[in-house]
Image (cartoon, rainbow, N blue to C red):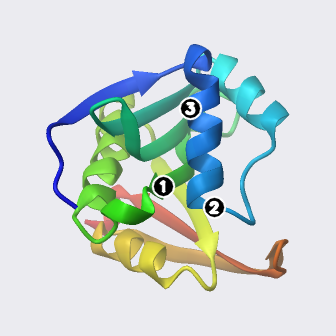
Amino acid sequence: MHCKEIIEKTLRIDSYDAIFEFDRLCFPTDYWNESDWKDLLKDDRATYYCLMDGSKIIGSIFTYNWAGSGKHNYLKIMNVAVHPDYRRTGLGHKLMDYAYKEYKESGLDKICAETRASNTAMQGLFEKCGYQINKIEEEYYTNPNEAGFKYVLEQSNF
């Protein structure tokens, strides 16, 4: 898919409808519920980075910054999505760069993320970006029920 011009943006709660619609498009059987999106988009520690082709979201990465929260001092990748028509074009890697930049600028200890056992594309992207499997948790996901592969990126992974 050829893009006219990719625009980089950070969206908040006022873009909720577009965000929720994009999530349902990318994850038709496993999208987040409305209240979770609304709660997180209002939270100052959550950031929704996106790539747009004109006015259409074509990729997003949603992070949560746990800096200074007791024993937590990490960035959590909550969600990564690329529009089906734009997959395998390098946008996933570009999105992962946003998380890495936030991690470095925030002085956090690590980045944590997870994906379904069946999502080999996301597993490959994590591994290409230097993430390592930290844990496999059986029956982590529902709809359908499957294991979750938990990844971590720390300075020692480089």
Query: Could you say whether the residue bearing mark 2 is in a helix, strand or loop?
Result: loop
State if disc 1 and disc 2 touch (CB < 8 Å).
yes
Q: Earlier in the sequence, mark 3 or mark 2?
A: 3
Residue 11 as seen in the image, left or right of residue 139: left
Residue occupied by mark 2 = 27
Residue visible at 22% across and 65% down?
89
Quadrant of the image occupied by residue 147 = bottom right
Residue visible at 60% across and 65% down?
114
Name the spot of residue 69 as percent of width and height, x first: 67, 29
State if disc 3 and disc 1 touch (CB < 8 Å).
no
Q: Residues within 10 Å of mark 2 (few under 14, many from 20)?
A: some
Q: Nearer the viewer, residue 91 or 72?
A: 91
Numbered tag placed on residue 25 in the rendering: none
Q: CA distance from mark 3 to mark 2?
A: 14 Å
Q: Earlier in the sequence, mark 2 or mark 1?
A: 2
Q: Amino acid at mark 2?
A: Phe
Residue occupied by mark 3 = 18
Name the spot of residue 80 as percent of width and height, x first: 49, 54
Visible residue check, residue 92: yes
Residue occupied by mark 1 = 81
